[in-house]
Image (cartoon, grey):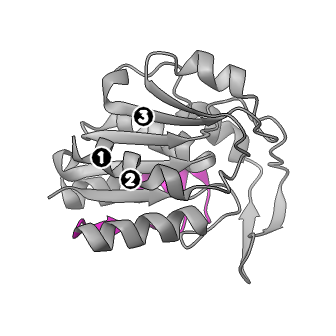
Amino acid sequence: MRTTLYLHGFLSHPDSNKGSLLRLAHEKAGIPFEAPELYMSPKEVAELLTKTVCRLGAENVNVVGSSLGGFYAAWLAEHFDINRAVLLNPALGNWGKVDFRPGWMQVSGIDKKMYVCESFMDELNEMLVREVTRPERCLTLLSLKDEVLDPTVTAKMLAKTKIIEIAEGDHRISDFTPYVEPILEFLRS
């Protein structure tokens, strides 16, 4: 059975609303689920994800990533032969209103801070996926009222993937519950 990796967004956490709902759904379905903390530089995230995929075996991995986690999910899907990738309002170079200035940043909803290093943007640009080469393996959830990232840019970049548009959705996909089962169905396929 394939393990799902959930990759949270910038200044979010594994137990955010999306992470918690996905974890619960996976537990109910008996599907292995891992959600690492990603409070490190992009280079360190790449190293962590590489070790995780090597430990599990790429053929045994699905990935779901939100925002910056979607960036990392797309990178993972392009560099390893994983089964499925679900991208939730992914930041694929369309940084919008995301603030990557160096310094300490407060993680949303928990008592934790993350240090953004000076090389953060350079490392992201080195990892940037400019084209999804296996779009049939990707599902994109795209909020049309995303207040952080421009959804038209994301839609253009991911036009060949299967896209679920969320007409009234915000960047966080606050009403995430209706999308949990479609995500699980896609991951099972």
Report the side of 23 relative to 115 (left or right): left
> Compared with residue 78, is residue 106 higher up or lower down, i.e. above or below?
below
Q: Which residue is mark 1?
A: 185
Q: Position of residue 151 (x, y in %)?
A: 70, 28
Specify which label sits upstream in the sequence, 2 or 3.
3
Q: Which residue is mark 2?
A: 181
What range is drawn magenta here?
Answer: 30-49
| Mark 3: secondary structure | strand
Q: Position of residue 28 (x, y in %)?
A: 29, 73
Q: Position of residue 36 (x, y in %)?
A: 46, 67
Q: Is residue 47 magenta?
A: yes
Report the side of 143 relative to 189 (left or right): right
Q: Nearest the camera: 144 or 108?
A: 144
Q: Nearest the camera: 189 or 130?
A: 189
Q: Nearest the camera: 30 or 71?
A: 30
Q: Are marks 2 and 3 in contact (CB under 8 Å)?
A: no
| Mark 2: secondary structure | helix
**x 75%, y 39%: residue:** 146
Q: Nearer the viewer, mark 1 or mark 3?
A: 1
Q: Pointer 3: residues within 10 angstroms few (<14), some, or many (20+)?
A: many
Q: Pointer 1: residues within 10 angstroms few (<14), some, or many (20+)?
A: few
Q: Is residue 169 magenta?
A: no
**x 84%, y 48%: residue:** 99
Report the side of 85 relative to 9 (left or right): left
Q: How many numbered discs, if any?
A: 3
Q: Position of residue 37 (x, y in %)?
A: 53, 69
Q: Which residue is mark 3?
A: 139
Q: Are marks 1 and 3 in contact (CB under 8 Å)?
A: no
> Compared with residue 129, is residue 34 higher up or lower down, i.e. above or below?
below
| Mark 1: secondary structure | helix
